[in-house]
Amino acid sequence: MKVAMITPELNGPSGIFNYTNQLIDGFNPEDEIEFSTITFKEGSLNPLEYIQTADKATSSNSTIIHIQHEYGVFGWLTLMSWVFFPTVWILAKWRNKQIVITVHEVINANLVQGRLKFVKSTYIHLINHLIGLAANHLIFLSDTSRNRFAQFDHSTPCTQIAHGSAMENRTNITQSEAKSIFGYGNNTYLISEPGYISNRKGSDLIIELANRLPEYEFILSGGTRKNENKMLERIKGKAPSNVQITGELSEEDFHASFVASDLAVLPYREETGRSFKNEVKQSGVLNWCMTYDLPVVASDCNYFSTLESQYGCLLTFPVDDIDAAVNRIKKVAETKSKRQSMSRGIEEFQKENSMETVCKEHSNVYSQLL
């Protein structure tokens, strides 16, 4: 079986590109699935680029075309969706290919904000309907996303498959070695927020936490997107001496940052923008924390709160409540029994979200379409 995977190219922090590589790497030779990866420039408004991407994928010798979808990768107002999806659907029909689309997040009318709500709701309804029409099978990374999409499309076959915890891809270094990469001694208690710096991810709260907890070291281990450069400069200007801001890391050092850390803090915000409310529906960073047995303190968005109640693998606090965040951090850092119970929850999460299971479920989807 041959699968052509379409994903935005790596250009700075790119969760979808990294997810795609992680997924492909999770398959074993005995699965007898051969992947080719076809990339396009994220956010491009050049229609020709999307037409060429669709043509390249469907003219290959792959029988399955698997598209990794997020609204923002198709340009402003996801306009290039109107070029790409009809093109890839027509070419796939002509060349007898099957289309799988992984929808990484779903926006519906309930998330629409601001003026012209009816117009925005209608537009997103049409976009989602377009995605459903283009696909022979849809994959969602959470039940929340699948249920939201069901409001638009009840007919396209779909499957919910976990993001996955890639245990086999863990870097093979000791915590002492990892800490030394970032200039810390072995006895330093290190608290990190891995991933790119942004307001949505609450990166500014790390500065407040570091001021409140001078006995610990903090590290923001990741780069930033171009539209967040002003925020990065503000953070740098306010950062106390116990905060390190690494900037963009190599893949090797990014993984080392998880090993070096004793605790991760994910103070994500569910922002209300001009048009849509950005909710947290899954987190690749959270999955890497679980992969590296790293306990997590996170904001109480629905996704993290669900994991807390289901597995006990993290502790949550009300978003932007610094006092609560400080208390949760101290509870993990200073209470052995709490760390032990969280460790058991992490182990349970790893078992239920292993890449072996994720890849098997993808293989079943592909097989159904042949």
Image: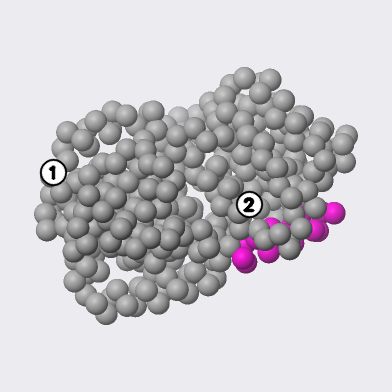
Considering the numbered disc 1 on the image, is that residue within a helix, a strand or a loop?
loop
Say which amino acid is labelled 1.
Answer: Pro
**Image quadrant containing the C terminus:** bottom right
* Predominant secondary structure, magenta span: helix
Placement of 228 over or under 162, stated as above or below:
above
The location of residue 242, given as percent across then percent down, is: 15, 49
The location of residue 336, given as percent across then percent down, is: 24, 77
Q: Looking at this view, is 292 or 71 the one in front?
A: 292
Q: Looking at this view, is 102 or 132 the one in front?
A: 102
Q: Which residues are magenta?
A: 356-370
Indicate the quadrant where residue 224 lies.
Answer: top left
What residue sits 37% from the left and 74% below the top?
343
Placement of 317 over or under 245, stated as above or below:
below
Placement of 105 over or under 91, stated as above or below:
below
Is 368 one of the magenta-colored residues? yes
Report which residue position mark 1 lands on. 240
Q: CA distance from mark 1 to mark 2?
A: 41 Å
In the rendered structure, the answer to whether residue 222 lies left or right of residue 77 reads: left
Report which residue position mark 2 lands on. 24
Q: Looking at this view, is 211 or 133 the one in front?
A: 211
